[in-house]
């Protein structure tokens, strides 16, 4: 699977699964699928090391959420130990159920980080700009720059660390990390200045004829569209009105905003120097991602909150597992398997220069 839109659909399906299914067993299957895709795409990019370091940071954050939830939540039946009750916030009993909640919450966040790491490795930022809506062309450039900021910073940090080690510096305590700060700050400022100069040389942000031709009234339509959306949500939450009323407000607000965005991007011009080819494997991956996304949303609609993980209920400490849902999540590993099979076939094919 190579097309950016196919990977975008996979990311939406995997992220939705991580947010809806908080069950640790289902999250484990999701992480296995994410790992299969990560192993398939990390060989084709030079930023794999930076995202690997970021995943280790995510694992550290996951480890910190467990004691945080255990000390803040004082519910549950299985008490591990007690802290003095006069201690603010953390005073009281520490239960196994609270530890399980912290484990599941951090596990879900780590799974989300892995999903977006795979997406950033599989799709280049320049490819994302080609599929940004016309009315968000400047915002698309800013988002693409933001997506590449953290990987570039981690790569720079690793290069500076290696250079300091060559000079004889040893990193033993946290104070030994101070020589990394100034070179990293200088490198970041130099890169920001170079980026600003290159964008200015290409005319980014200039008020050309296309921007001046955009209708001002279309921009003012966004405000009433947002007002209709807000009115529909408030009516749904507070007033016991029939369903068709707030649905009509939501549809009217969304339609008005979509019309305004369409008019704002009507005069924007875009050049495409090389179009991304849509292959049969992209169709297969997109269909599988759409199946998983629709299946998870349908389960959430039918089953409600029973798909989550709530260990405070009696006898609910061990998370339940249904093989059908597990099989649905396992389908998210298909794009990585497709890439691995394609690489195996390509490496096994005879070269054209062989005699």
Image (cartoon, rainbow, N blue to C red):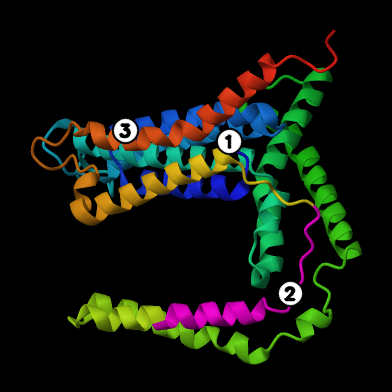
The residue pinned by badge 1 equals 54
Where does the N terminus fall, quadrant-wise? Answer: top right
- The image quarter in which residue 261 lies: bottom right
Compute the Cα span from label 3 to label 2: 44 Å
Q: Residues within 10 Å of mark 1 (few under 14, many from 20)?
A: some
Q: Is residue 347 left or right of residue 1?
A: right
- The image quarter in which residue 183 lies: top right
Residue 353 lies, with reference to residue 76, above or below; the image says above
Q: Which mark is residue 327?
A: 3
Where does the C terminus fall, quadrant-wise? Answer: top right
Q: Is residue 30 magenta?
A: no
Q: Residues within 10 Å of mark 3 (few under 14, many from 20)?
A: few
Q: Residue at x 35, y 51 (%)?
A: 294
Q: What range of the chain is rendered magenta?
A: 252-273
Residue 210 rendering spot, x and y as whole percentages: 79, 80
Q: Earlier in the sequence, mark 3 or mark 1?
A: 1
Q: Earlier in the sequence, mark 3 or mark 2?
A: 2
Q: Residue at x 14, y 37 (%)?
A: 316
Query: Circle 2 sits in a helix, a strand or a loop, which is it?
Result: loop
Query: Circle 1 sits in a helix, a strand or a loop, which is it?
Result: helix
Q: Nearer the viewer, mark 3 or mark 1?
A: 3
The residue pinned by badge 2 equals 268
Residues at badges 2 and 1 in contact (C-beta under 8 Å)? no
Residue 341 rendering spot, x and y as whole percentages: 57, 23
253 or 92, which is in the foreground? Answer: 253
Compute the Cα span from label 2 to label 1: 37 Å
Q: Which mark is residue 117?
A: none
Residue 80 rendering spot, x and y as whole percentages: 19, 29
Compute the Cα span from label 3 to label 1: 29 Å
């Amino acid at each position: 699977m190579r097309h950016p839109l196919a990977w975008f659909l996979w990311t939406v399906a995997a992220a939705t699964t991580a947010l809806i299914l908080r069950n640790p067993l289902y999250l484990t299957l999701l992480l296995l699928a994410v790992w299969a895709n990560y192993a398939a795409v990390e060989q084709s990019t030079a930023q794999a090391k930076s995202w690997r370091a970021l995943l280790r940071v995510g694992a550290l954050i996951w480890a910190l959420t467990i004691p945080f939830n255990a000390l803040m939540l004082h519910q549950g039946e299985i008490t591990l130990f007690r802290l003095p009750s006069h201690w603010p916030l953390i005073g009281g009993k520490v239960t196994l159920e609270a530890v399980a909640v912290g484990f599941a919450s951090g596990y879900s966040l780590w799974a989300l980080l892995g999903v977006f790491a795979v997406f950033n490795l599989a799709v280049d930022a320049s490819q994302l700009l080609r599929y940004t809506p016309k009315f968000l062309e400047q915002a698309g450039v800013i988002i693409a720059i933001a997506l590449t900021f953290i990987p570039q910073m981690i790569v720079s940090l690793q290069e500076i660390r290696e250079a300091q080690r060559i000079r004889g510096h040893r990193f033993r305590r946290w104070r030994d990390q101070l020589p990394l700060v100034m070179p990293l700050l200088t490198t970041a400022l130099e890169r920001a200045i170079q980026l600003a100069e290159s964008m200015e040389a290409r005319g980014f942000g200039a008020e050309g004829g296309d921007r001046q031709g955009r209708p001002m009234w279309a921009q003012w339509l966004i405000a009433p569209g947002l007002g209709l959306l807000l009115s529909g949500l408030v009516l749904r939450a507070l007033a016991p009105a029939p369903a068709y009323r707030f649905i009509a407000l939501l549809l009217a607000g969304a339609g008005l905003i979509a019309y305004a965005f369409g008019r704002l991007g009507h005069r924007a011009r875009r050049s495409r120097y090389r179009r991304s080819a849509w292959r049969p494997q992209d169709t297969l991956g997109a269909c599988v991602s759409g199946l998983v996304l629709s299946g998870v949303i349908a389960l959430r609609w039918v089953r409600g909150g029973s798909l989550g993980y709530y260990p405070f209920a009696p006898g609910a400490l061990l998370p339940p597992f249904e093989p059908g849902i597990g099989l649905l999540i396992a389908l998210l590993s298909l794009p990585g398997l497709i890439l691995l099979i394609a690489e195996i076939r390509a490496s096994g094919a005879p070269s054209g220069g062989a005699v």
